[in-house]
Image (spheres, rainbow, N blue to C red):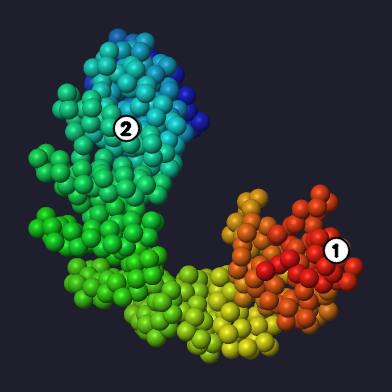
Amino acid sequence: MVSHAHIPSGDKPGTSMRHSGAAANDVIIGRFNRGEVGVNDVLRVTTACIKKLGADHVGARACLEALQRCRHPRTGQTVFPDTINYSAAIWSCEKAARSDEALALFAQLEQIGPAYGVFPNTITYNAVISACEKVARADDALALFAHLQQHGPARGVFPDTITYGAAISACGKAARVDDALALFTHLEQHGPARGVFHNTITYNAAISACGKAGRVSDALGLFAHIEQHGPARGVFPDTITYNAAISACEKAARADDALALFAHLEQHGRARCVLPDTITYNAAISACEKAARADDALALFAHLQRHGVAQGIFPNTITYSAAISACEKAARADDALALFAHLQQYGPARGVFPNTITYSAAISACEKANRPDDALQLFAHLCQYGVIIGVFPNAITYNAAISACERANRTEEMVRLLNDGITAGIFQPSLGFSKGQNKLDLHENAVLTAATNKSSRPAGVHPALARAIFHYLLKQGVIGETTCFVVGQHGQASLLTAIGACMRQQGWIPVHPRDSQGRRNRGVLAVASASMHTDGTRAGASNFP
């Protein structure tokens, strides 16, 4: 398009472009300024240079800005970027996941382009929506889709399958499943009239959106939809489709559905060269783990070992962690330790190492099987070697190790673990005790330095940790009969029961004290005394079951 307009940029004209190796753009501009080539030549070479730059979005914008230096010596013609130039530059921003720059270029095109007959086309919209999708900017993606719907038809511009796929994926990444499904339905209703149909990518994006939102029934419904309607259009589920559907089942602990999908892939996928990958195995094993199906989890791990290796598929840290966690839930310490040993033996050669989750699951498996020696050996291994690979124990690891010591009545080691946890910054130095209030708060946000739940309704600590803290502080003389114990104002019965039992072991009668309005505070325990009648019972009687 012949004309001239300023193209805003925060970069010095041409600097990034030359630095990025797109000197050809400078050459063609020089030739234009000498009258050797025409406008179309400049636009064509500029587009080629931008595409060559790939994710160098700064260089791409510099290529556009460089067109300001175009001026034909005889005609005085200047050059304004065309739609192809803009689309290529926006795709460059998309490749770099720079959505702000992509949106700025789109806004620039919308603002300046019409004066020169330059408008966004479907490719332009696809580029800018995809840039938003990469960073989960669903609002912007939906606004752009609406803009296309509103302004595109008058110029013969309509969404294609790529547009829908990018917009649906943006909604999925932002956990906007209803918007994702609305776009899916919109394509179903309005696309066919323009020859636009679902492809594997749109199905994958929609199924993934449902899975992330915990809508497993919708995810399975979409999988059934592609099975029923896809083949007529040459659309079949690929590995990503299966992974998304199995992951949806995993989040809902629907092991039967996950295993059925895995079997379906094994039965029907291979004929289309669709094979399970590590993600498939991880999702299926995790589904079994969440449903406490250790045998199925181990069978899948064995299947991976037997069939996956030939296809270049190997277990990673997630695979091992999920399989060990499945064994942990079934208290199968031998299997858990065998998997851990397998990881230690074969993982490092492939860059696979245990992480905190792996160690925690293995330690917990030993704890549940009443094998404190194995649990503490694993904990010591983590403390000794974990630092080399940047892996450290967390609160869950300490809980499992402390619980193992408690089962074996190894008090001294429990005390050491508590002190180590304080030193490591896992536990608050106070362990939840407030001297000023003479109150022991056993919620995570009071005991842990990095509580897993920062909400106004915090969870209580693990009962084993609560008991360890009780006895630790009691032995130090920090708590006593006048101490109040905050044990879960939100109905955490396990913590309430644990501390109530600790109090009874001391010969104390646990009661729920009443507040200023005479209501029982069921989240707090105190010791009944001869003078305590605030609960309406006789002195010394417990109102705690």
Q: Residue at x 76, y 67 (%)?
A: 511
Q: Which image quarter: residue 268? A: bottom left
Quarter of the image containing the C terminus? Answer: bottom right
Q: Residue at x 34, y 59 (%)?
A: 254
Q: Amino acid at mark 1?
A: His
Q: Position of residue 138 (x, y in %)?
A: 42, 35
Q: Amino acid at mark 2?
A: Leu
Whether residue 162 sits left or right of residue 63 in the image: it is left
Q: Which mark is residue 19?
A: none
Above or below 361: residue 168: above
Q: Nearer the viewer, residue 336 or 162?
A: 336
Pointer 1 residue? 533
Q: Nearer the viewer, residue 353 or 471?
A: 471
Q: Which mark is residue 183?
A: 2
Q: Say few, some or many: other residues with alpha carbon within 10 Å of mark 1 (under 14 / 14 to 19 / 20 or more).
A: some
Q: Say few, some or many: other residues with alpha carbon within 10 Å of mark 2 (under 14 / 14 to 19 / 20 or more).
A: many
Q: Which image quarter: residue 253? A: bottom left
Q: Residue at x 32, y 48 (%)?
A: 217
Q: Position of residue 503 (x, y in %)?
A: 74, 76
Identify the mark nearer the N-term, 1 or 2.
Answer: 2
Callout 2: helix, strand or loop?
Answer: helix
Whether residue 501 sits left or right of residue 382 in the image: it is right
Q: Position of residue 418 (x, y in %)?
A: 68, 77
